[in-house]
Structures are given as C-alpha cells and as structure tokens.
C-alpha cells in the first residue's frame, strides 16, 4: 500500500466486513480480556532528552507486551514546548514507524498550540511480521488466523490497543519520576488504522481515556458501510485489496466470522464509548463513501464534533485547484489542537447542531451554535455518480445560513456547512454532516 511521508498519516484500509450482521446488546469481552491481562514483559526507559529552540523532546524505549511470543517494542517521544508545564491530561498520538523529522514538527506544532506536553507513540503495530507482512496485509493475516483457530487474541487491533494502554502506564510513571507530577487522563488520537485503535482504546473501558480524536476512519457500522461503499463505487474500494484477496470481504457466514465483526467494529461498543469525541475526515478520501458518517453519527453517545477537510484525501492535506497539496494539514491540525486544548484545560467546545429538512429535492440546512462564530461557509461539490472521490469542492461565497440547496438537473450534488471559531487565540473549524442530493429520475 502507498505510504505518505507525513507523520499525520498512517495509511491503512479498514475492512468492510459483511453485508449484514445482527445487532448485539453486549459486545464480546475479548478486547477487554486481552488488554487487561497482566503482561510481565512491560518495561520502559528514558533514553534521551534534547533541548531545542522550540522546547524539550524526551525519548522513551517502551516494551508494551508480548503477543504470540513476539515482543512489541516502541519508541515514544514527549514534546514539551518552551514555557509549558505538565498538565493532568496529556495528548497521546499513536502511529506506525519510528520518529522522524516530520513527526517532530507535527508533535511540537500540536504541543505549542495546546500549551502542554504531547506524547507520540510509534510502532503501532509491531511490523513487519509473518514473512514481511505490514499494515493491511498484516491485519488481514491476523483475521484469517482468528477464523482458523477461534483464538480471540489474534485480531491485530487488540495488541495495538494494549500498546496505547501500556504507553499510558509508562507516561504516568515517567511524569512522576521526571516532573514529580501526576498525569491522570489522556486524549487518545491517531489516523486511519491508528484512529480505529483510538476508538477501541475507549471501548476497552480504560477510565484514563478522557476523550478521543479518531482521524480518517470513517467506517463505523461496517455492515452498512459495505453496502454504501458498493452503492457509491460500484464495488469495494481498491484500497481494501488485502482483505478481498484473503476472501475476508464479504466475510464468511460463520459464527466465528460474525464474532470477529463484533469484536473489532467500534460501532458495536457505542454504548460504552461515551467520552467526548472529535472526528476528522477528508472529503476526497479514496477509502470511504462520502456520506459514510451518516450511517453511524446518530448512534454515537456523548459529546461529539466533526470536521470535514475540503479537497483532502486520506492524508488530510488540502489540494488547490491545480492539484498541489499543502505541506501540512492545517485545517485538521488546528481543529485537533483546539479539541485537545479544550480537554486539557476543561474549556467547553462550541456546541454546533444542524437540521437538513429535505422536501421535493430541496434541502434547507439550518445550524445552531452556542458560541459566536467568526465565519460560516458552505462547501459544495458535484458528481455524475455517488462517487465523489475526484470531485472538486468549491466554497459557495453567496450562501448564507440557513441555506437551501436544490437537487441538480442530473447527477448528484453534495454539501456541508463549516463554522469557524476562536478559543484563547486558537482558530479552528467545525462542520455539519454532509448531505447528498440526487437528480430526480
């Protein structure tokens, strides 16, 4: 699979497992059982401390666990900007790979915005494994092994979650030792596969998870998502080839396969995931149908917000009209930082609600906010089909809320509203859900 160099992006397809699956009132216990099982291989050590103009960077070597006789070792960096002090809540970003210059820029950038230490956990998951498999191929391999063995410890997401839990353990111990300070909660975040892991970390029941910010993992309620993906693209996305090649899509109609879906879909745990959550997606992400959020948004419990980044794919970097990408995903980083800042300092995020009243091919979008907005924008895109992956999003500069959008004469039109705010000199944006209108036949 193609890998972007930006630290923000952890490219991975998530399997769209089945066309239908039963609802379950009680999720399987396999995730919590694995994560809470004592592992004597856990260890951490401070190996470096560097002072830079922008602040201090600590580096920790971490062993999170031993999974199927494989020791998971990680690098972890802690970014502390100048004049920042430790806080009771820390941001914990999880990603693959090892530290690099871009991850350092991103880490210090977020830490500077939130005015508090930020930790980056690398090597999620441990890879390559099993004859060189990585990312999607590795996940697919572990799913097949679960189906073959019925051993509930095989799905790769479980040790990925445990790596975050172990990182929280290490960070708390580090803070007491280095800063003589107690960290008691975390905002867990990451992109794509690591966003999926963020969801499941909250689902594990660990009370230290104060909030989550899953990025570009727009596929909860997977059975419904698979139907929607085929409806939009005509077939499963090419980005999930590793799963179709292993005949995991659609998943076999067996008891083990149904349980696998229940074990790894965050939607199944929705009653347990009540912490505040910030969802960030790109409008041109090749993995997910454009309106994927609409299949699960109403089911989410607790406070929730969403940001759509127009003209951005899986890396959340916006493209201009000539196709040139911005260097860093500014919109996403600004909103992520504002959300983390709100959780660290217990500052309320703006409450934004909306209603799209559709009648006779016309949608009237009404928004309501409990905070003063600096600006409000409406973004639109058109497509001949429900596949908007190559569509160009344009700001409708004449639109004012409430706005009425009419179905096109042919094809489809999609739109959403974006509201800009400021919190303690942090400028950021929030979005409404996307809506798609189809021409009358």
Image: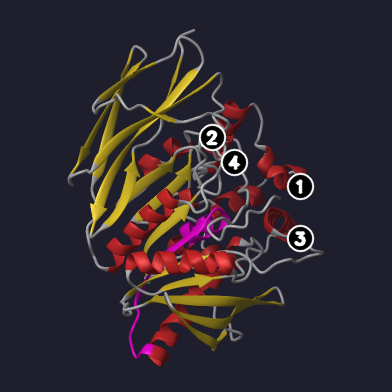
Q: Residue under circle 4? A: 287
Q: Residue under circle 1? A: 246
**Alpha carbon of mark 2 to alpha carbon of mark 4: how far?**
7 Å
Q: Residue at x 76, y 60 (%)?
A: 133
**Alpha carbon of mark 1 to alpha carbon of mark 4: how far?**
18 Å
Q: What stretch is highlighted in magenta?
A: 179-200
Provide the secondary structure element on which disc 3 rests: loop
**Image quadrant where residue 413 sits:** top left
Residue 404 against residue 163 in the figure, above or below? above
Q: Which numbered marker is on residue 289?
A: 2
Q: Which of 20 and 242 is in front in this view?
A: 242
**Alpha carbon of mark 1 to alpha carbon of mark 3: how far?**
13 Å
Q: Which of 194 and 392 is in front in this view?
A: 392
Which badge, 1 or 3, is on the more N-terminal residue?
3
Pointer 3 local density, CA inside 10 Å: few below 14, some 14–19, many at least 20: some
**Alpha carbon of mark 4 to alpha carbon of mark 3: how far?**
20 Å
Q: Residue under circle 3? A: 133
**Alpha carbon of mark 2 to alpha carbon of mark 3: how far?**
27 Å
Cβ atoms under marks 1 and 3 closer than 8 Å: no
| Residue 73, x across and y down, in percent | 64, 78
Q: Which of 41 and 390 is in front in this view?
A: 390
Left or right: 139 with respect to 382?
right
Pointer 4 local density, CA inside 10 Å: few below 14, some 14–19, many at least 20: many
Provide the secondary structure element on which disc 2 rests: loop
**Alpha carbon of mark 2 to alpha carbon of mark 1: how far?**
22 Å
Residue 403 against residue 17 in the figure, above or below? above
């Amino acid at each position: 699979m193609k890998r972007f160099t930006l630290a923000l992006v952890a490219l991975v397809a998530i399997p769209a497992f089945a066309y239908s699956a039963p609802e379950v009132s009680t999720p399987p216990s396999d995730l919590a059982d694995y994560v809470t099982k004592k592992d004597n291989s856990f260890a951490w050590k401070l190996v470096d401390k560097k002072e830079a103009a922008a602040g201090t960077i600590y580096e920790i070597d971490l062993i999170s666990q031993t999974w199927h006789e494989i020791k998971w070792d990680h690098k972890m960096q802690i970014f502390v900007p100048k004049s920042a002090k430790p806080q009771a809540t820390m941001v914990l970003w999880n990603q693959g790979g090892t530290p690099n210059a871009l991850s350092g820029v991103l880490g210090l950038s977020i830490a500077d915005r939130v005015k508090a230490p930020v930790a980056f956990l690398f090597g999620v998951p441990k890879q390559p494994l099993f004859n060189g498999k990585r990312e999607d191929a590795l996940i697919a391999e572990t799913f097949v092994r679960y189906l073959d063995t019925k051993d509930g410890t095989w799905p790769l997401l479980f040790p990925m979650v445990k790596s975050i839990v172990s990182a929280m353990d290490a960070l708390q111990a580090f803070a007491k030792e280095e800063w003589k300070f107690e960290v008691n909660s975390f905002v867990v975040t990451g992109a794509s596969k690591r966003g999926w892991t963020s969801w499941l970390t909250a689902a594990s029941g660990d009370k230290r998870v104060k909030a989550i910010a899953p990025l570009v993992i727009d596929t909860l309620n997977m059975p419904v998502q698979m139907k929607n993906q085929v409806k939009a693209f005509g077939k499963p996305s090419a980005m999930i080839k590793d799963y179709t090649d292993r005949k995991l899509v659609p998943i076999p109609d067996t008891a083990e396969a149904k349980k696998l879906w229940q074990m790894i879909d965050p939607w199944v745990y929705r009653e347990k995931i009540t912490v505040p959550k910030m969802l960030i997606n790109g409008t041109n992400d090749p993995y997910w149908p454009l309106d994927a959020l609409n299949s699960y948004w109403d089911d989410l419990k607790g406070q929730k917000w969403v940001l759509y980044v127009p003209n951005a794919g899986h890396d959340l970097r916006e493209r201009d009209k000539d196709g040139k990408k911005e260097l860093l995903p500014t919109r996403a980083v600004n909103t992520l930082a504002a959300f983390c800042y709100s959780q660290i300092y217990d500052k309320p995020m703006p409450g934004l609600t909306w209603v799209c009243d559709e009648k006779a091919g016309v949608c009237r979008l009404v928004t309501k906010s409990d905070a003063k907005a600096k600006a409000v924008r409406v973004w639109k895109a058109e497509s001949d089909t429900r596949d908007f992956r190559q569509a160009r999003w344009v700001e409708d500069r004449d639109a004012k809320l409430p706005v009425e959008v009419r179905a096109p004469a042919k094809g489809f039109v999609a739109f959403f509203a974006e509201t800009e705010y400021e919190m303690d000199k942090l400028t950021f944006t929030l979005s409404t859900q996307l809506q798609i209108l189809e021409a009358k036949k």
